[in-house]
Amino acid sequence: MSRPQPGQSPDRLPEPPLPRWLPAVFPVSLLVAVLWGPVHAAVLCGVAFVAVGYATTRKPALWHLAAGTGLCATGVLAQAFAYYLMLRDGSLGPHGSAAVLFLLGLQFFLHGRKVRRAAQLALSGLRRHREENGLLEPAEPLGGPRPGSRWIPFATTGIFGAVVSGLGSLFLCFTLLALRDLLTTDDNPWWASLVVVGLFVQTVLFIGLGNTILRTSVQYYDTVVSSPNDLAGRRYVLYLRSFRDDQRLSRPHRIPLPGAWLGAAVGIGQGEEERIADALSWAGTLVGVGAPGERVPRAGARRMYLPPDDWQTPVSTMMRGAALVVIVLGKGRGTLWEIREAMRILPPERLLLLVPMREKAYDEFRALAGDLTPGALPAYRRGRALSARVRGIIHFEPDWTAEFVALRRPSPLEDQLVGSLDRAMWPAMVRLTELELGLERRADGRHGEG
């Protein structure tokens, strides 16, 4: 019997793919809304929804994914149309109608993003396979509030961040109005261009500062794991990486320039570590060691803080208790020690390596690592480039033979990193599931003999 393909259960037929032209419908709708009005754009979006419904009749989760994408697109269209009204009329409109439309579009976008995340998890072939084998457990809350005084209420920081981001959007309106006057008026003073540039710089600063305040306030009130003893008897995934990679992997997911601008203008983008946590949720809650001295835990993995001079023993203990150990490759002695220690004490099915580097950097790391007993790092494999920093994964056969799997683009509507990881981790998940089911059968047999 052949092994099932990624994202496909053994007893199911392949699902019909989504049309590749689908992502282009929403930018075209935005262009139509600006040129011919929102009614024509709504008709175009309706046609796209009918096409999506026809293409996804056999997979209900894709309905929700398409609905979340439609909500996000509607929110973006509403905000773009609000900017267009302000640019056309030179004001916020009667009774602030343009501002109301903008806020309504923001709510549509944020709610659509939540629907998309839930649908992406429901679409996961890994989660479905684990559930069919009775191994998918609901996520348990881990950790507690971080010790220390919290003298700024969360609601206050959230309101302040929203106000600062709103000021950034207001400065964007002023920038567009000033640019319109600059382009339509002949006799402009010499400093008019400097005013436009200054307004644009203020727009970027206020939006970036507001989103940073919102993101930091959420992280400041996140929970942390106080000690490895709190993980005893819990199901978790141990996430290890070089602390120098924290900033890169916690930044919002890279997307093309227009999308990055809209994402910064209307909300807080997820970092890659948060997306990695979603992609690994089938195995358990993601837990990582926090960088010494950081004031707030970064979003993604639940943080645990260890003493800088005695971290190896607790990490080794957590490796033994983890359902899966995930190590992000990076230059540093700590990362090399973690890989060797994991190979020493773990079965190969419980180790997974993430590759957040290009071929040249990977070859340098491979030469630095040398021979890793009992396994060795495989050669780099190129895939279709994603807008993610993570380029591929490495998983191991039962005899420690390593295989490099390059990430490939999933269907157009899916989250690029979560969807590609969900497919790339299929062989590793199947082997881990077989290992866990075998351990359960042996434990049941010993219990019956007793």
Image: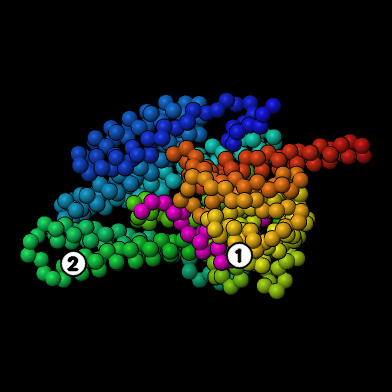
Q: Amino acid at mark 1?
A: Lys
Looking at the image, residue 231 lies above or below residue 43: below
Measured as percent of width and height from the top left, residue 55 is found at 44, 28
Q: Are marks 1 and 2 in contact (CB under 8 Å)?
A: no
Measured as percent of width and height from the top left, residue 193 is found at 18, 66
Q: Is residue 163 visible?
A: no
The count of marks equals 2
The stretch drawn in magenta includes residue 239: yes
Which residue is at a point 18% across and 61% down the rendered structure image? Answer: 178
Q: Secondary structure at mark 2?
A: helix
Left or right of 336, for residue 300: left
Q: Amino acid at mark 2?
A: Ser
Q: Which mark is residue 331?
A: 1
Which residue is at a point 69% across and 51% down the rendered structure image? Answer: 351
Q: Residue furthest left?
A: 187
Q: Is residue 207 visible?
A: yes
Q: Residues within 10 Å of mark 2 (few under 14, many from 20)?
A: some
Which residue is at a point 59% across and 36% down the rendered structure image? Answer: 6
What range is drawn magenta here?
236-257
Measured as percent of width and height from the top left, residue 324 is found at 69, 50
The stretch drawn in magenta includes residue 164: no
Residue closest to the eye, 7 or 103:
7
Quadrant hosting residue 4: top right
Q: Residues within 10 Å of mark 1 (few under 14, many from 20)?
A: some
Q: Residue furthest right?
A: 450
Q: CA distance from mark 1 to mark 2?
A: 46 Å
- Residue assigned mark 2: 193
Left or right of 335, for residue 250: left
